[in-house]
Image (spheres, rainbow, N blue to C red):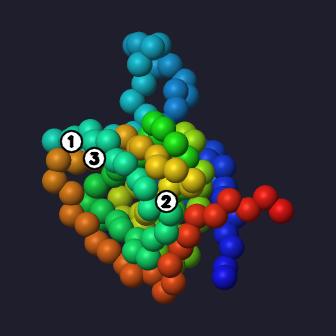
Amino acid sequence: MTFKEIRTISGDAFAPYGDVIAFRSPCESDPFFEVVCGSSARGWRIAMYRVERQAVDIMECHPDSRESFEPCSGTGLLLVGIPDQPEDYEVFLLDRPVCLNKGVWHQLIALGGPCTVKITENDEVSSQFHQLSRPVRGVLYTG
């Protein structure tokens, strides 16, 4: 069995995969509003996603659109890999909202009980899938 460290989301650690959604610095025209990530796509949608699975064997990517993951309840793990390397993924505790770059491989796993995540993405999303060479299971190890 292979173990991967669960990383904490920070701007630097998450930079290869996308943006951390956070208020960084106010703009001069409106100090209370800041666009932190965007897309040139016209239509978009907001969805709630309930994750119950504690293991996955497939990664997914959207080559033409970005996608946000915003934790709402429970504890989730976000697996992410750069576009050409879905097997070389990292695992992050999804405790802050993030927005993935186009083409980033990703998957969600619930740690413990179910978790819910708010997702914002383009209205029409094309997806690609990659079968992992071995299943990934979220396990909390305290040893």
Considering every residue shown, the one lying at the far right of the view is: 143
Measured as percent of width and height from the top left, residue 2 is found at 67, 79
**Residue 59 lies in quadrant:** bottom left
Residue visible at 21% across and 41% down?
44
Badge 2 crowding class, 10 Å Cα cut-off, few under 14, some 14 to 19, many 20 or more, is many
Residue occupied by mark 2:
109
Residue 106 in sight in this render: yes
Considering every residue shown, the one lying at the far front of the view is: 113
Q: What is the three-letter code of the residue carrying label 2?
A: Ile
Query: Which secondary structure lies at badge 1?
Result: strand
Measured as percent of width and height from the top left, residue 136 is found at 53, 73
Residue visible at 50% across and 55% down?
110
Residue occupied by mark 3:
121
Does 60 appear above or below 115? below
Q: What is the three-letter code of the residue carrying label 3?
A: Glu
Residue occupied by mark 1:
44
Residue visible at 67% across and 69% down?
4
In primary-sequence order, the first of circles 3 and 2 is 2
Q: What is the C-alpha distance between the residues marked 3 and 2?
A: 19 Å
Residue 83 in sight in this render: no
